[in-house]
Image (tube, rainbow, N blue to C red):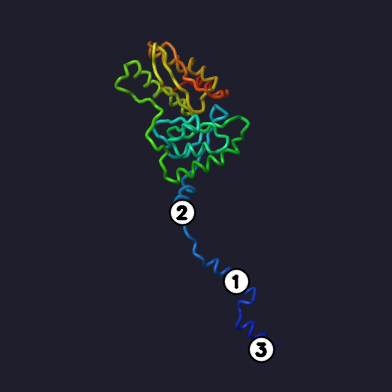
Amino acid sequence: MSFLFVFKYRFCPMMNPYTIKKQLLHHFVQRPLFPLPATLCNTVRHMFIQTQDTPNPNSLKFIPGKPVLETRTMDFPTPAAAFRSPLARQLFRIEGVKSVFFGPDFITVTKESEELDWNLLKPDIYATIMDFFASGLPLVTEETSSGEAGSEEDDEVVAMIKELLDTRIRPTVQEDGGDVIYKGFEDGIVQLKLQGSCTSCPSSIITLKNGIQNMLQFYIPEVEGVEQEMETQRSHCCSGCRRIMKRGFKT
């Protein structure tokens, strides 16, 4: 019996349960730690997305801390309009997202209704934006621009309208997650399109008439009025346009 006892614990140490545990722990501690993928490290260390409320409760401004479109904007009112942007397509896959808007350094996401809680949508939006910037893919697959650049065919009045929009009006609207796009000038009427957080807002008429129209008429006597290019969408009221009009435009 004594010989068997000595044999078991002298020549078969793996039968000792304590030896087995110590051996596994030893191997675990000694195992080399492989570095995280570079994309994940960059995401964790360098991507900090801030959110900013807009006057429209259904729209939220996401600021990734990196350039988005830098000097221009793009509006995606429907999923079909997002075919040129991989990021916009991914955002539309999140349940509850109604529209997407890209600004120079921000992304505005509009939800479908006030009943949807932003706390339920934000985690998926954060993850989508972070994954996209970590991937290194281009924001748009084809060169497009929502802004209206100057044209050689523009007469002096149109050129003045565009300059006033770009320098005084659009920067203020972009601060609230939206934009104003020039669409045309005919018979004294300036056609404009509101994008982003102020899209289809009933208060936008106040901004157009009491804010933008008054400024254009003050500097450009040829302007007789301003009209908004409307789209067939569900309207939702917000105080954004009233706040923009009360605060005034950049001077």
Residue 111, visible in the rendered structure: yes
Identify the residue at image location x=61%, y=70%. Answer: 21
For the C terminus, give its image quadrant: top left
Q: Earlier in the sequence, mark 3 or mark 1?
A: 3
In this view, the residue farthest toward the right is 1
* Residue 65 x, y percent position in the rendering: 46, 39
Give the label, 2 or 1, closer to the camera.
2
Identify the residue at image location x=51%, y=25%. Answer: 199
Asked whether the beta carbons under mark 2 and mark 1 sit within 8 Å of each other, the answer is: no
Please, is residue 98 above or below residue 136 in the view? above
Q: Secondary structure at mark 3?
A: helix
Q: Amino acid at mark 3?
A: Phe
Quickly name the residue at label 2: 37
Identify the residue at image location x=42%, y=24%. Answer: 181
Q: Please rate how many residues cluster around mark 1, counting C-alpha atoms within 10 Å: few if below 14, some from 14 to 19, many from 20.
A: few
Quickly name the residue at label 1: 22
Residue 238, visible in the rendered structure: no
Quickly name the residue at label 3: 3
Q: Please rate how many residues cluster around mark 2, counting C-alpha atoms within 10 Å: few if below 14, some from 14 to 19, many from 20.
A: few
Q: Earlier in the sequence, mark 2 or mark 1?
A: 1
Cα separation between marks 2 and 1? 31 Å
Please, is residue 164 above or below residue 66 in the view? above
